[in-house]
Amino acid sequence: MIQMYHVYKTYGKDLEALVDVSLHIQKGEFVFLAGSSGAGKSTLLRLIFRDELPTSGQLLVNGRNLVRMKPRAVPHLRRMLGIVFQDFKLLRDRTVEDNLALVTRVVGMPALEGRRRVAQLLKLVGLSHKANMPPYKLSGGEQQRVAIARGLMNDPLILLADEPTGNLDPELAVDVTRLLLEINSRGTTVLVATHDLKLAEEAGRRTVFLKKGRIVEEWP
Amino acid sequence: MREKLKHIFAHALMNLVRAGWGGLASIATIATSFLIIGIFLLLVLQLNALVAKWREQFRLSVFLEDRITQTQLEILEKRIQNEAAVRSITFTSKEEALANFRQELKDQQSLLEGLGDNPLPASFQLKIREGYQSPDALRRLSAFLTRLEGVEDIQYGQEWIERISNAAYLMKALGIIIGSILTLGSALIVSNTIRLAVYARAGEIEIMRLVGATKAYIRAPFLVEGMLQGSLGALLALGMLFAAYRYVAATSRLASPLFSIATDRGFLEPSMMAALVGGGALIGAIGSSLSVSRFLKT
């Protein structure tokens, strides 16, 4: 599903964010990307949703070469991906429901189907009763669940999560991880960047360790 | 397609409402800029109308020798009429001149009693075509007329005509310079205001980008919103200008007979109003699409 071959990413002259990274993730896998901040986790995710291009190396997502992809094809790539961030990135000035509905409009989903999908996903993340609230009235864990639901609106092949539990208490972090595992069990490939080694360890899934832009260890 | 258009307009309107005070601030800024441009435009128009009126009323007098014969008079009239510069010609006989003079004096007619013979000369009054009203052309025309047989003297208020044409030239030059500075200035102010409004929605743009919206999809509502803001601002400015104009025109008619000549001309021409509103829409559209582009690298 994701194939990286000798990928380098350098900012400016000598800030090496990724160095010779080769990584293969199969369809349906759940992978943790572990490392301290500045290790290159976010950069690696940004390459996958083509917010950035690698300085050198090749990168394929669902068989498509991102290095050679034309800019106009990028929106279609992103519709195959769900993206979740540490800071949720929810719009404060509209309800939970409208935050999700934004996606249905962007991809041109018929209104009725869109509403059904919003309801279905809010149910999945257990927030049906808060559909009409603005996000800032929700707890951090709930907000992250809304963000995850939004990430799933396009029924993505891959869910990318950048420190999804970084702003959450330990118990809520476990909740969110459980939700991500459940999503994975339904067939979505999930890639989670985290600095919380304990969380990765407890989940017992494949974990790739990054240090100073290099893959230094892999577990198991 | 219809669904898309609906989205674009609904979204633009929604954003306009959501922007709240920010959106109103943009509209107010645009309105202020356009009000200044509008006032300036109106002033230029009024001054132009004034100059045109002066030009229209402009007469050149050809005074004739007393001993001119009827045949000479007819020949002279023909020759003058054939001049390209002359639009129309009217004859005033010695008697008519005296009668006019008497009428002007009215109460002081006793002044004329000692005069005996009529001392006033007969004359032709010439209206001059607009293209020939420059000081140079008039000087040439008057030199030509002086040489004709039976002509005693030429009068046309040389100093006045030079002043008016200098003033008209100055107005045109200043109009172009000040007008371009004002337009450029408002374009910058407006695009900055819109940029701030777009920055305030950077989060929304980012999310749309991440969930796979195309650039056109993201840009279109902002474009329409910018156009709406721009044209609303321009309309507001026109409304205020019109109200102010009506008030000034009504009061100045009493205050200054000079200004009333100009105000008879009426408000801005419809084509100018349309250009202002269109210009507002254009500035709004350009301002917002430039600002949105900053967030749309891919």
Image (cartoon, rainbow, N blue to C red):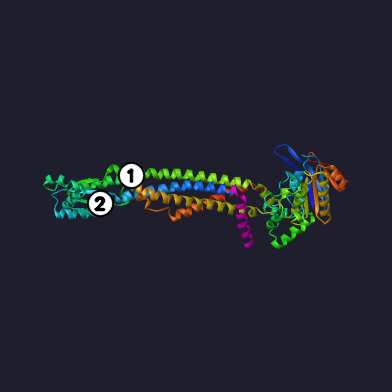
**Magenta segment, which residues?**
B1-22
Q: Are marks 1 and 2 on the same chain?
A: yes
Label 2 chain ID: B
Give the total of numbered labels: 2
Residue name at image x 74 percent, y 61 percent: A116
Mark 1 to mark 2: distance in Å?
19 Å
Under mark 1, the amino acid is Ile
Q: Is residue A67 visible?
A: no
The answer to whether residue A110 is magenta is no
Q: Quadrant of residue A167?
A: top right
- Mark 2 closeness class: few <14, some 14–19, many ≥20 residues within 10 Å: many
Magenta stretch: residue B5 in it?
yes
Secondary structure beneath label 2:
strand
Residue A195: image x %, image y %? Answer: 81, 42
Question: What residue is shown with label 1?
Answer: B164
Which chain letter matches label 1? B
**Mark 1 or mark 2: which comes first in sequence?**
2
- Is residue B21 positioned above or below A186 on the image? above
For disc 2, the marked residue is B126
Q: Amino acid at mark 2?
A: Leu
Contact, mark 1 vs mark 2 (Cβ under 8 Å): no
Along the line of sight, which residue is nearer the eye, A25 or A107? A107
- Picture coordinates of residue A90 (x, y %)? 71, 49
Q: Nearer the viewer, residue A102 or A66?
A: A102
Which residue reaches farthest top? A14
Q: Residue at x 23, y 48 (%)?
A: B61
